[in-house]
Image (cartoon, rainbow, N blue to C red):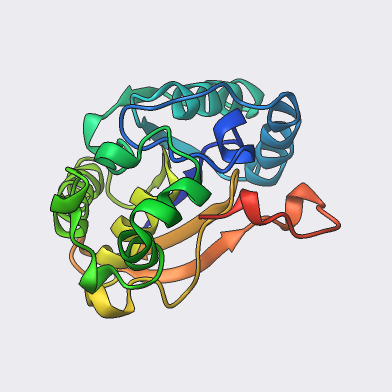
């Protein structure tokens, strides 16, 4: 059995400010995110990873490098463009509140109704396209590294779409499990690289947070 550990990057300045980063926007990790990544490393320390695959965006790269440096064993790392965040077109860099005023239906459907989302209005990427590139990437990793543990560091919206796509959920139910938080861990398993089982969704207990912050999760 192969296990894939999906990590959402640490919290960034734009996450805190409720801005869309997307595939081209980016901002630095918050100082406290570096501490949280060390807590994540402590949680993952018992797991021996064969390889790590990481989005090319700086927030994911920094998270992965800090995480791997804090793990007890070396993990080879490969950057994969297919793990990049959603291309959100005109929404990138905008505050959530401003998008809600300009494109309320687009925002509502992006977050809650993937089957109704029309990416053409904002010149972005479709859910189907993100799921397709994500599934292609994970399928290749599993084929290359069977029956081992694989680490994947990516982004909240792309991970949510890609993981649920691997699980075979239709677009209308893609958001049923809720969002993914910064520095969270979600685990899938597979025996054949075709069907996947969910072992853990959005685990963050190791961060020891005492209150819910809505800017942590997308």
Does the rendering let one see residue 1?
no
- List x then y, in percent, for residue 36: 72, 36
41 relative to 208 in the view: left or right: left
- List x then y, in percent, for residue 97: 52, 50
145 relative to 57 in the view: left or right: left
Q: Which residue lies at the image location 47% right of the left edge and 74% below the top edge?
A: 177
Closer to the camera, 75 or 103? 103
Task: Classify 165 as above or below 72.
Answer: below
Q: Which residue lies at the image location 22% right of the left edge and 77% below the top edge?
A: 170
Q: Which residue lies at the image location 38% right of the left edge and 25% below the top edge?
A: 57
| The furthest residue to the right | 210
- List x then y, in percent, for residue 45: 65, 39
Does the rendering let one see residue 45?
yes
Closer to the camera, 135 or 2? 135
- Tell how many labels: 0
Q: Which residue lies at the image location 35% right of the left edge and 31% below the top edge?
A: 55
104 relative to 8 in the view: left or right: left
| Picture quadrant where residue 77 is located | top left
């Amino acid at each position: 059995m192969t296990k894939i550990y999906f990590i959402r990057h640490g919290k960034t300045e734009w996450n805190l400010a409720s801005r869309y980063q997307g595939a081209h926007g980016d901002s630095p990790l918050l100082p406290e995110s570096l501490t949280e990544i060390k807590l994540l490393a402590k949680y993952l320390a018992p797991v021996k990873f064969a390889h790590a695959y990481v989005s090319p965006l700086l927030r994911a790269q920094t998270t992965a490098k800090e995480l791997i440096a804090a793990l007890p064993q070396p993990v080879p790392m490969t950057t994969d463009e297919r793990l990049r965040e959603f291309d959100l077109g005109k929404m990138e860099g905008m505050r959530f509140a401003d998008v809600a005023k300009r494109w309320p239906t687009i925002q509502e459907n992006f977050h809650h109704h993937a089957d109704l989302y029309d990416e053409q209005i904002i010149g972005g990427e479709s859910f189907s396209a993100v799921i397709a590139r994500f599934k292609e990437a994970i399928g290749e990793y599993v084929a290359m590294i069977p029956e081992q543990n694989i680490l994947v560091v990516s982004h909240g919206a792309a991970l949510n779409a890609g993981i649920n796509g691997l699980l075979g959920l239709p677009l209308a139910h893609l958001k049923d499990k809720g969002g993914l938080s910064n520095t969270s861990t979600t685990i899938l398993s597979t025996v054949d690289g075709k069907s996947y089982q969910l072992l853990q969704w959005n685990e963050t207990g190791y961060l020891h947070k005492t209150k819910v912050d809505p800017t942590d999760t997308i």
